[in-house]
Structure formats: structure tokens, C-alpha cells
Image (cartoon, rainbow, N blue to C red):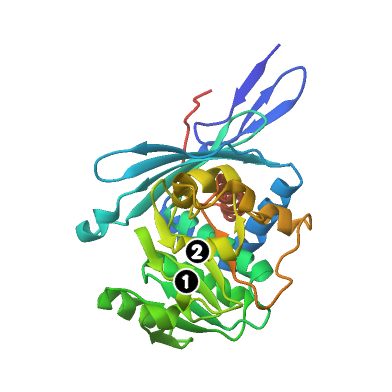
Amino acid sequence: MTVLLKWSKFNWEILHNSQRIYQLMPTLLLDRNAIKTLIEMSDVINVVEEAFRMCGEGRGRMPAKTYLSLEHGDFRAMPAALPGGAGMKWVSVHPQNLSLGLPSIMAILVYNDPETGYPLAIMDATEITAYRTGAAAAIASKYLARPDSHTIGVIGAGFQAHTQILAHAELFSPISINAFDVSKAAMDRLACSFPQFSVKNCSIQETVASDIVCTLTPSRSPVIKREWIAAGTHINAIGADAPGKQELDPSILKEAIVVVDDLKQASTSGEINVPIQKGTYSIGEVYGTLAEIAVGKKKGRTDNSAITVFDSTGIAVEDIAVAKLLFEKAKRAGGYPSIDLIGT
């Protein structure tokens, strides 16, 4: 027997049956402004690192992202589940959007109760994507960069550069920033955003000479040459996140200790995807995943002269971990709009 008590259209509902009591609430709607008020980089780093640990322990579920390619960009479907949370991010990547006054990357996320499938929240995931990408790279740097690293080089001064700096500043101190971008306006915005740091406008070679290098371009051919890379450098290869994209000279990968966020995704759409397709690099040469390092199954940096590379494609468990964090914060704070999607 099932009894439904509805207090009002937008209040809590209790669905009672012979097995358990479900507490239902209208689906929260969190727009980009709401996300901005809720999100903090230190919190994001904590939950993203825990998500990697859960995956390393076999407690995360995540198929590889699915791509829908169109004339001017692509869409990506990214489902995942972690203990206590599940959902899917639907993200678009349209590089020409900047000329239209729109973000080049936009995303929404549906966050569900994993036990019932109930849609707990629909949220803008544009900010989430940027923050969790910066957090994942900083976590990789924590394990793979030299402990005395203090210069951060960003190749590409767009919005992702901002979150890379925010995240690394949480884990490395003091830091100074070397940056390169073909756009002077982007460089000026970056420098103005971080008056607390030394942000130096550098050549690409000078930027690559940093202790930690974050490559953030949409390039489909290498922009970083092997001869620019000094011993002991750590590289977060972020820009290659779709088939055919490539930022690094493949010879860098051959010499480096390469760690990926997800082996299947990286081999088809990460920094290693083009060298694998051309037969100049193989999956067997990958050292391991960041999840394996986070749980201690494999070691991080052990040689200060080694070149290390983190191939970051962006994985859905990162998004779900952050979505869970933000949903719980929003629920505690109250006052956010909601919608009765289910209508029970």
C-alpha cells in the first residue's frame, strides 16, 4: 500500500511504502550566479581528490564521455556516480563563442539521488567545469611536481588559466605566474585578476621554463617543443580534450612519466590520443592514473630530474563530486528556487 501526503506544490513530500520512507523535495535550480556564491576552490580540491581516491578504491562508476561533433563545435555527455550522488553533465565546446560574447565552454548538470533516481538539482556547470579542471591539475601537481616548485606557467590566458592559478595557489606557496597568450587583452585580464601575485607576460619559451606548466590551448598540433622543457618540469596537459587535439611534442611523452585521469578517455581524446593513432606512443607506456597515485597503488614523483605529464581530459566523477558539495551547501543555506519536475 502506498500513501502520498502532499503539503504544498513546492514543499517536502513524503512517499511511504512498506519498505522505506522517501523524502522528496522539488528540484533545486542553481544558475551560474548561484554556483559562484557557493563554490570555493579549497572545497573543490578536497572533494575532487576524494573522488579520485574513491575511483582508485573501485567506489566510483563512470563510462567514458560521449562526443557529438557538429560544424562549429561539439557536445559531450558525461555521466558518473559516486557514493551518495549520481548525475550527468552535458557540456558544449564552441571555440568561436568568444567572438560572440559567450563562453567557449558551457555546461549544465543534472544531479540525482542514486538510490531512487530522483532529480535533486539542475545546475549550471560552466563554473563547475572550470573549477574542477583547475583542482584536478593542482592535485596532479601535488603528487608529480617537485615539492619546491614555485613558478606556474600558463600557456593560454583564458578563464581556465584563472582557475589553474587559484587551485595551485591553494597547494603551492609562494607562487609567481609566467603567462603566454597571443591575445594582449586576455593577458591584461589575467594580470588584473590576480594583483596579489606576480603575473609576468612572457614568451612561450619563457613560460615553459616554469616549474609547473599548464597548457590550456585548443591546438590540434604541438605548440610545446621538447627542447624548451627542463629536467624536473611537471606539465599539466589540459587543452587536448577531444580527438585530434594535441599540444605537446610527442617526444616529450616518450621521455616523461605520463599519468592520466582516465586511460580510455586519454587514449581517444587526451594528449596521448594523436601519438597513439600515429603509432609513436602506446597505451602501455602510460605510467598510471591519478586515482592509483592518490590511493598509494603507485608512487608519485620520486626523481627530481624527471619530466612528468598529467594528461587531463576531464572526468565526470569530478563534476559529480562538486555537484554533491554544492547541492548540500545550497540545501543548508536555503532560499534557492526550485521546480516540481516529478509532480507526484
The reply to whether the C-beta atoms of the residues labelled 2 and 1 are less than 8 Å apart is yes
Between residue 205 and residue 124, name the one nearer to us. Answer: 205
Q: Secondary structure at mark 2?
A: helix
Residue at 61%, 81% (x, y): give it.
Answer: 149
Q: Secondary structure at mark 1?
A: helix
Asked which quadrant contains residue 137, the reply is bottom right
Quarter placement of the N terminus: top right
Which residue lies most toward the top here?
1
What residue sits right under mark 1 in the picture?
226
Q: Is 53 located above or below residue 147 in the figure?
A: above
Q: Amino acid at mark 1?
A: Arg
Label disc, if present, on residue 251 of the rendered structure? 2
Q: Is residue 219 visible?
A: no
Q: Amino acid at mark 2?
A: Ser
Give residue 77's position: percent from left, percent from top: 46, 38
Give residue 71's position: percent from left, percent from top: 24, 41
Q: Is residue 51 visible?
A: yes
Residue 143 falls left or right of residue 64: right
